[in-house]
Image: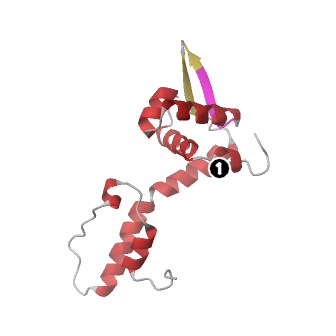
Amino acid sequence: MKIHNPLDNILNNEVKVKILRFLCKTEAEWSGRQIAQEIKVSPAATHKALRELNNERVLYLRSVGKSYLYRLNKENLIISELLKPLFEKESKIPSEVYKAIVRNISSFVREDIVSIAIFGSLKRKKRASYKRYRSFSGDKKLEK
């Protein structure tokens, strides 16, 4: 594991980030194929990323029969001090965006808001454009 800028190797591609996010949420042992299915990435790409993460010492690898099981190395400072707290904060972003939308709409509306409909990419938990939220929020400081 690199001492200086270790995140360069650990977070250098999307598959690794998906694996780490998934393992931080579940905190269990998983086979490479199970992880690939859960994060919806090909087994080959998943196994390559798992090998690299294991080489960086952020994962433990255990052999069970013909399978290998992976889990987070919670003793690794990068996992315990950086990535777990980061992914926990990341999971709170949708609710924080929702609160900001309600707060911004409330400033324009005089009556109490009864309900707000969420649809599109935010509802489907797909990639949502922050730019769209910025223009909707009316926050002029965020606009360029």
Near-viewer residue (95 or 50): 50
Query: Residue 41 at x, y = what percent?
Result: 47, 38
Q: Main secondary structure of the magenta part?
A: strand
Identified at 64% across, 36% down, the residue is 53
Answer with left or right where residue 113 lies relative to residue 141: left
Where residue 55 appears, as percent x and y from the top left, is 70, 33
Q: Residue at x 60, y 22 (%)?
A: 62
Q: Residue at x 66, y 38 (%)?
A: 75
Q: Is residue 94 magenta?
A: no
In the rendering, at what x and y percent does residue 143 appear? 49, 82
Q: What segment carries the magenta color? A: 57-62
In the image, residue 68 above or below residue 89: above
Amino acid at pointer 1: Glu
Dividing the picture into quadrants, the one containing residue 103 is bottom left
Residue pointed to by mark 1: 81
Q: Is residue 61 above or below residue 113?
A: above
Relative to 67, say whether 134 is above or below: below
* Residue density around tag 1, few if under 14, some if 14–19, many if 20 or more, within 10 Å: few
